[in-house]
Amino acid sequence: MNITIRNIVKKFEKQKVLDDISFSINEGELVGLLGPNGAGKSTLMRILTGFLPADSGEVSIGNCKVDVASTGIRQFIGYLPEHNPLYTDLYVKEHLSLAAGLSKLTNRKQKIKNIIELTGLEPEKHKKIGMLSKGFRQRVGLAQALIHDPPVLILDEPTTGLDPNQLQEIRELIKKLSKEKTVIISTHIMQEVEAVCNRAMIIDKGRLIADGSIHELKSGNLNIAQTIIAGFNKIVGREQILALKGVKNACFSDGLWNLESNGNYDLREVVFNFAVENNLILLTLSEKQQNLENIFRNLTLKNN
């Protein structure tokens, strides 16, 4: 199912937590909502799932409007909140049976069996939740979110606190689930989005400051500072390089120039034209691909 958010604003007293957020997500996308702690991610997740009202704006899933009063919309949403509330004194199967009952599911035993297999809970299904590792507790939370087979899955910080093995297992499970569902992951961990998602939205101080595919973000197609490496057959002065259109910074090391753009020009074209105009031979001209961590830092610093 498609998700559409239009002009969402949310304030807590005088503080604006979400500031005119708008975006749409197509059916089957796996999207990462990335931002520092306190950026407004969890608030947006709660509005998306109908647990918190927006002050203004509109959220819709498919053709259905989402708000606190529309409890029926929750049949289309599976939600794993950040702190994953579980009944730790219940056995895994008991907890999932309770979740199935609350969703008024028919054929509950078979659906519980299927969801236990899907989420890899088979070895732990007869244990109390309080005895489980953090990784298996997250699996129980995912199983609870999936028990009613929703077309949309919303996961708020799903891998926080996991060890490397648990992290990889949960990532693989999320990617598997995304083949049949629209999935949104909220996280402050850049590597999480890069490892799992095919699209990233960056939110900071309640504002959406970037939105694009991982490739678009890393290739600098969203007006993000570009870095290129250039080498010439002759010595070129730093003053000449800094005078080039769009060059924000330049440093020379091991015979090569590292040039950083101001985000407004493609420096490859600028440097090529400079070489032609000055009868220089370009020995090297390549773009340094950015990782999401650098992109995230650049964008949030710019927003500040």
Image (tube, rainbow, N blue to C red):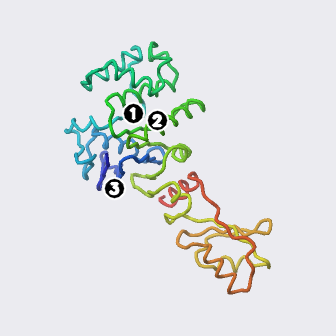
Q: Secondary structure at mark 3?
A: strand
**Residue at x-position 58% and y-position 55%:** 294
| Inter-mark Cα distance, 3 to 1 | 22 Å
Amino acid marked by disc 2: Pro
In the drawing, what numbered circle is on residue 241?
A: none
User: Is residue 145 left or right of 222 when viewed as pictured?
Assistant: left
Q: Position of residue 286 (x, y in %)?
A: 67, 67
Amino acid marked by disc 1: Leu
**Observer-nearest residue: 180 or 256?**
180
* Residue at numbered disc 1: 80
* Residue at numbered disc 2: 158
- Residue 90, above or below 206: above
* Contact check, label 1 and label 2, Cβ < 8 Å: yes
- Residue 6, above or below 159: below
Q: Position of residue 150 (x, y in %)?
A: 32, 35
Q: Position of residue 53 (x, y in %)?
A: 25, 43
Q: Mark 3 or 1 closer to N-term? A: 3
* Label 2 Cα neighbours within 10 Å, binned few <14 / some 14-19 / many ≥20: many
In the drawing, what numbered circle is on residue 22?
A: 3
User: Is residue 246 left or right of 56 when viewed as pictured?
Assistant: right
Amino acid marked by disc 3: Ser
**Observer-nearest residue: 193 or 224?**
193
| Inter-mark Cα distance, 2 to 3 | 23 Å
